[in-house]
Amino acid sequence: MSRKSVRGFTLVELLVVISIIALLIGLLLPALSRARAAARTTTCLSNMGQIVRACTMYQDDKDDAMPVAYPYGSNGNTGALSNFNHGGRYPVAGSTMGIYCVYPFDRPLNKYAHPDIPRGGSEVRDISQWNNWRQRMDPPLGPQDFQDPNRFNFPIFECPADKALSSNYQEGGGINFIGPRSCYQAIGTTYMFNIYWQSWASRHPRRNNTWNWERGTKMFQRARLVYPSQFISFFDDPFDATFWQMRPPTVTHHGRPDVNSASFLDAHAEQVKTEYSNNLPLYNTSKYFLIYPEYLQ
């Protein structure tokens, strides 16, 4: 009676198979990484488009008024010009920017962007209540409730690529400050409202703070009708850093220091590439405006 021998894998064959599997993994991982990055970018741009639409609904309800003017800070501070209190959560505990941020119920776009999410405050308040936060909140809520990272989140205002390892110059550091909190955690939103035109208005021959803001408001209304596809209404944190600090951060939400997410007045959103002249960022380009062309005349 003959016996058939059972032949197994040789060591060389096993090593070849392992090498092929490792090679395939090496080829697939970068593709998966790029796919994840593309998905984060798509979500980010979708968020920004929804924010512009929420802004448009706000303006329709407010006779075309801008959503952010001179807001009160959470500590009763007045006169603080802010470009990040339009929507989002309250900063998580420990953030150094909390004194400049308002609560979710005082961020005007929250009820338009997230109408079904509780905002945690009194909807109608007397102006005297600004000086006492206890009168502005539905009991038993307090600041600790709004700082809890597991409560009062508004996802549209958070870019999925906004992590503690990306640029967040809002919180006390330099332009390349990294961590310990993301921009969303530090100030309640990833996205800044474009008030860069206000800085340029202050350089106008008719310089006057009241005139600057009133003039800018009127121009903003006209901009919605004249060049809505070119005028940037919101942008992400690193883009804000570029133009206030006059240089690009080395670490950004989406991996390139000169490419940032932006949304326009016609409610479309795209990634824009910063153009430079003599190593300085350009305010207005052939593709987008950050300030009104009238201020450059």
Image (cartoon, grey):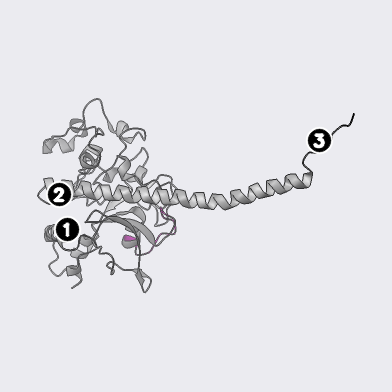
Neighbour class for label 1 at 10 Å: few (<14), some, many (≥20)? some
Task: Determine which residue is flagged by label 3.
Answer: 6
Q: Amino acid at mark 2?
A: Gln
Q: Position of residue 240 (x, y in %)?
A: 32, 57
Could you tell me which residue is drawn at 42 percent across and 52 percent down?
38
> Does the magenta portion include 211?
no
x then y, percent, for residue 246: 34, 64
Height in image: 87 above or below 213?
above
| Residue under numbered circle 1 | 224
Above or below residue 147? Residue 13 is: below
Q: Main secondary structure of the magenta part?
A: loop
Nearest the eye: 34 or 255: 34
Q: Using the numbered discs, state the Cα–Cα distance from disc 1 to disc 2 in whole angstroms.
A: 11 Å
Question: Where does label 2 land, which residue?
Answer: 59
Q: Secondary structure at mark 3?
A: loop
Residue 51 higher or lower than 292, as above or below? above
Which mark's residue is nearer the viewer, 2 or 3? 3
